Amino acid sequence: MDMHLPYQAACEGRFSVVGFSRLAAAIAVVRSALVQKNTQIPNAVEILDAAIATVSCVRSRGDTTDVWEITEAERPSVLAGIEVAEECIGVLDVALLANTAAMLFDQIGAE
């Protein structure tokens, strides 16, 4: 998934619930896969956690206002998360990412 397209849309106030969900899921899957594999990429989990927290704030605001936009102040955190996620995808195998995505979607479905 190209995470930059939904990011750009969010910066321009064209973010949708679907775009938000895909971006949040992609970052969360990479973060969880890193933890499962115990990959030692400096600060990766912390940067992804910060991006997830920021995207959660965007979601809360969007749920209330129906405006899904990443503010100027929020952009560095989300962009750093996207960049780290893309970097980490290169060291994680596809099966791990697919299994992690399935596990997270199962957890969400159970809630």
Image (cartoon, rainbow, N blue to C red):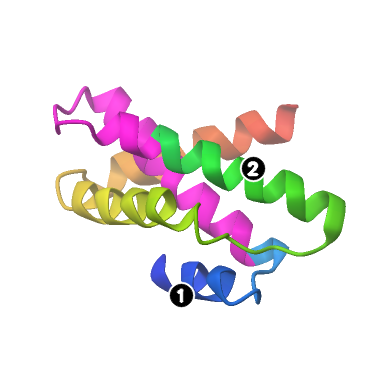
Which quadrant of the figure contains the N terminus?
Answer: bottom left
| Mark 1 or mark 2: whose residue is earlier in sequence | 1
Q: Is residue 81 above or below residue 44?
A: below
- In this image, 2 relative to 110: left or right? left
Residue nearer the viewer, 92 or 44: 44
Asked whether residue 79 is drawn in magenta, I would say: no
Which quadrant of the figure contains the C terminus?
Answer: top right
Residue at 81%, 51% (x, y): give it.
63
**Residue 46 found in image quarter:** top left
The disc labelled 1 sits on which kind of residue?
Leu
- In this image, 30 relative to 11: left or right? left
Residues in magenta?
19-48
Could you tell me which secondary element the residue under label 1 belongs to?
A: helix
Residue at 73%, 28% (x, y): give it.
110
Residue pointed to by mark 2: 57
- Total of numbered circles in the picture? 2
Q: How far apart are the alpha carbons under marks 1 and 2?
A: 19 Å
Q: Is residue 13 above or below residue 20?
A: below
The disc labelled 2 sits on which kind of residue?
Cys
Instruction: Pinpoint residue 38: horizontal percent, then vertical percent.
Output: 21, 22
**Residue 43 found in image quarter:** top left
Instruction: Pinpoint residue 101: horizontal percent, then vertical percent.
Output: 47, 42
- In this image, 2 relative to 15: left or right? left
Question: For mark 1, does the 10 Å Cα neighbourhood hold few (<14), some (14 to 19), or many (20 or more) residues?
Answer: few
Residue at 25%, 35% (x, y): give it.
44
| Tag shown at residue 5 | 1
Using the rendered image of the protein, determine whether residue 4 is visible from the camera's viewpoint.
yes
Instruction: Pinpoint residue 96: horizontal percent, then vertical percent.
Output: 30, 39
Residue at 48%, 74% (x, y): give it.
8
